[in-house]
Amino acid sequence: MPKVPNPIDITRFKQNPCESLTSAQVVDLLGDEARITPDPNGPGGPGCGWFSQAKIAVVFPNVDKLGLTSVYRAKGGAYPFFMPLAPVEGYPVVAYGTEDVRARLGECNVALGTSDRETLDVSITQSPAHKGEKDPCDSARDVADKVLGNLRGGR
């Protein structure tokens, strides 16, 4: 179970999840036609979705205070698909899901540990035109990297 050596405060984005990506980043990722869907009271925690041909969702889970531990505990149970990825600037990242739908649906969910108690979760669905060009878990990790950079005040 990876520890988070330098916890980062995610309160600001929990209060305004749609600020977790800048408008320039959204245009870069999805084009300038993306629709924004705030979900401040989402069932898993405050989140935001951006939709065009592809979809991105960022959620700040508040179901428990276990951070990545709860994802690791579900390995092989609730999450048969479980794949640790390279950390982002020292912050541990894991892809997870009820099944591996990368090839079939171009989808992936990743959780990045922001502290030992909290994560930020990114879900992406690739556009039909770009499905299969890049592993969607790598794309989701790239988005988590952007959100982390924004949390830290930009890079």
Image (spheres, rainbow, N blue to C red):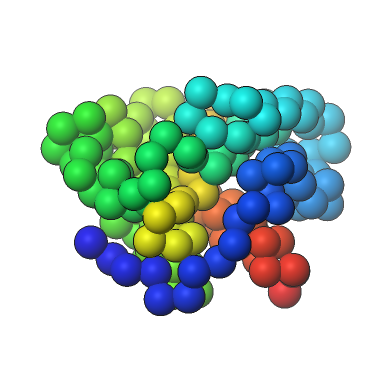
Q: Quadrant of the N terminus?
A: bottom left
Task: Examine the rendered structure and indicate whether residue 141 appears above or below residue 107.
Answer: below
Q: Residue at x 28, y 28 (%)?
A: 98
Which residue reaches farthest left? 76
Judged left or right of residue 115, residue 32 is right
Left or right relative to 40: residue 113: left
Q: Nearer the viewer, residue 115 or 27?
A: 115
Considering the image in quadrants, where does the C terminus appear?
bottom right
Compared with 87, 40 (above or below) is: above
Task: Give residue 38's quadrant in the image.
Answer: top right
Name the residue at 14% across, 37% down: 76
Residue located at (61% from left, 56% from top) = 10
- Residue 5 visible in rendering: yes
141 or 32: which is nearer to us? 141
Residue 28 shows in this picture: no
On the image, the x and y values in percent for residue 120 come to 51, 49
Quarter-of-image position of residue 106: top left
Q: Where 6 sits versus 109, above or below?
A: below
